[in-house]
Amino acid sequence: MTTPEDDTAYENYPRRWEADVVVADGGTVHLRPITPADADALVQFHAGLSMRTRYLRYFSAYPTIPPRDLFRFSHVDHVNRVALAAWLGGEIIAVGRFDTIETGLAEVAFVVADAHQGRGIGSVLLEHLVEIGRELRLLRFEAIVLAENRAMVRVFLDAGFEATRRLEGNEVSLRFDIAATERTQKVMAERELRADSRSIGRLLNPKSVAVIGASSDPAKIGHLVLQNLVTAGFTGPIFPVNPNARSVNGILAYPSIDEVPGQVDLAVLAVPATDVVDVVRQCSRHQVHALVVISAGFGESGDVEQRAAGLQAQRQLVTEARSHGMRVVGPNCLGVLNTDVAIGLNASLSTVSPLPGRAGFFCQSGALGVAVLGEAARRGLGVSSFVSAGNRADVSGNDLLQYWETDPATDLALLYLESFGNPRKFARIARRFARRKPIVAVKSGRSSMVAGLQHTSVQVPEPSVQALFEASGIIRTQNIAELFDVALLLTTQPLPAGNRVSVVGHSTALGVLVADALASSGLELARLVDVGVTATPDGFGQALEAELDRRDVDSVITVFVPPMRRGGEYAVAARLREAVAGRTKPVLSTFLGFDGVPAELAVPGPQAPMPGSIPSYSSPERAAAALARVTRYALWRNREPGQVPELSGLRIEPARTLLDEILSVTPEGRELTEPEVRRLLGYYGIELVAAETVAGRVEAEQAADRIGWPVAIKVAGAVRLYLSDAGDIAEAWRSLELADDSPAVVQAMAPRGVDTVLQVLDDRSFGSLVSFGVGGLATDLLADRSYAVVPLTSLDAVELISAPKAFPLLTGYGGAEPADLPALAELVLRLSRMADDLPEVVECSLDPVVAEPAGAHVLNARIRLARPITREDLSARRLRAL
């Protein structure tokens, strides 16, 4: 595959349009704009098309490409004429292009090699051409297709666009607007979900595995990987690859992957880093589907120069793999596991055999992954699949979430994250995932970037991380121990309907501890039931059943201290398990000394733990904390997600034009002037309190007459308020020591109310956040701010306003009249809409906003523009750039 060496290799070559893409069957292809150097590849591509395919594309036999057409096909200006080629293994397998017909309208066409039809490549090309068309300010596409070419007609109709069709003879003319709509975004997200899910499915459900670097030496990692595959009972053929051995551990070995007979779905690479790229090329020739690169030495350690060289080798590794349709886990990873008995996959370095279960686990750290699997087994938590991504050069947590969302063997996702690769995409996927299945996550590195991960990480400030998690319904825990506490509850018990908790136990002292823990966790104590130290197992069980029958109880925590003489706890545990069977309310236990799911509280079955088992916690505080996190998630999931509302009075095109005019003069961006701020906010229905800049005291009086008395005078950081006549202005001029012609700002006085602050903060990792706080030094000192991810729904806006601890000041605290919260919420929504429409607005501060009983008034605003962030999350499907 020819690739331009730099952006100047061809005039106006748009490198930003290049992309690696996962197609419908889970394989990958590389898209890039066509250049004159691709002429020979185009001829070869055309020669490989069947007569039928050529007829459907060109409406004639078209056996060869005439020189004139070849020049036109390979020479495009990337403005009025755009062409993309899909490459696989160094060959073109599809071409999509559009030619501008008239202002705003272009004709679009595709052709896909016969061997690759039905893989969704035409749909991918359409997505990318539409995105390019929008960038070039096109409004609509037209396609002329033979009526018998139903497959191509479906490509256009299934893309979510509203197309008009006109039949002329045997030709169908389709025309459609290419503006993004909710339907087109939904179609792209669904296609991405299916493609990514199949891509990871090929990785975790292989029919055959090759271990490249397999060894009989127990000290080498190739030995451990092979041994784990055999021990786990992998159900398909295992192919050791070692050029210096005829067999490894009694299994026939092969000198190279080229010599392996038949298909290899998954190759595990345990070779020196310097050999990895060559081995990847061998795997590409053998058409391997996926790679797990355990080898280290790719930029995660060493000095600056070594890391730079390692990073370059890592890019080369992934580029080579993707260009031949392969996904990569790693490098520098622990490996992958799938506990399904029909697969039995342990392609990892883990010496722990995980229990089969319903939790999917993603962990970036290989070393931590071993400890995590060991702790999971100790506490009786099984996994459906496990992936340790290491340097996460390709496969990431986002990919695993896509797979687990559609995997019937997985009921919840567990994530240990050190960094984010594409946080915007993570937020979108997680929010959708969490509506169906829980996500429990530990995010380390709160204060800094994790050493060794700079090359694959995006540093996200802690407020942004918290806002992202809360908006997405993710259950966040502080550490791995808490993650397991929550996971055990989610895998064994139903979700609670509310936050009312009963406590059943035979120790008043412990019951009080539980009650205190509930209060600290934000849960409501419904009842505290003490059955007494002499209670029989049946008495314990009956008390639990009575609480579960109560309508004012949503969850129950049982507390039991084992007797001095062993044995009594078994009968109590069995009776409690019997009482819980078939119930729809969660039950937790605190069997002091037990942690996890003891056998006596576990329902027998093939998975660990089985639904209906009762999780046990070694302290009341841990039980209450786990229940509180799950309760908050259940309430989030049960509430209506809300809608991004339609707002009246928006003038988006003039706003877009204003920004284009400014950035055409200062492409790096700048802070807007006061008149520009007023114009831009006005286009979104945000009006600043009337103000005028004046030159002198006389003009100030005239401005006050126009604006309306009383007014404020602002100058050089000083202000004078409630000036009601010319005499007050004269006194203000004297007190500020201004000359008669000194400049100042005259502003109308807003009604008295509570000062608040609204801001748009640009997070370069995943876009914009809106923050809200009640004004004041104490609020600034305590960082009493709330954050929400753009775009906000109506419900998000209300919650953003009510989240700060100072919120009671807006609801009549101390006898004051309540502020107009709906007006404040509408202001939040308008600011959110502006931030979502205009990514160039990297900073916007409305400070102060006076919230009073009859409205919300913006007294001052500041806006700064900068180069727009590429919003890969909202664009055509593409893998994370290398």
Image: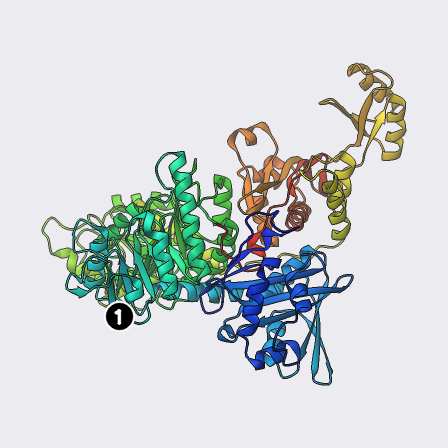
Q: Quadrant of residue 585?
A: bottom left
Location of residue 332 with respect to 689 vertically, above or below: below
Q: Which one is in front, 542 or 617?
A: 617
> Relative to the observer, which residue lies in front, 624 or 218?
218
Give above or below for 455 relative to 267.
above
Q: How would you rate the neighbour count of disc 1 (Cα within 10 Å): few for under 14, some for 14-19, many for 20 or more?
A: some
Label 1 belongs to which residue? 236
* Residue shown at the point (47%, 54%) measured from the top left: 473
Up the image or down, 590 lies above or below 253; here it is above
- Secondary structure state at the residue bearing disc 1: loop
- The answer to whether residue 559 is visible is no
- Where residue 689 appears, as percent x and y from the top left, is 77, 37
Name the residue rendered at 58%, 65% in the picture. 125
Q: Residue at x 65, y 58 (%)?
A: 132
Residue 59 percent across, percent down from the top left: 66, 80
Q: Is residue 189 visible?
A: yes
Judged from this view, the residue extending furthest toward the front is 67
Q: Which quarter of the picture shows residue 645?
A: bottom right
Name the residue furthest left.
Answer: 565
* Image coords of residue 516 (percent x, y): 34, 43
Res. 492 image quadrant: bottom left
Report x, y in % for residue 172. Answer: 69, 79
Image-based side of 135 in relation to 380, left or right: right
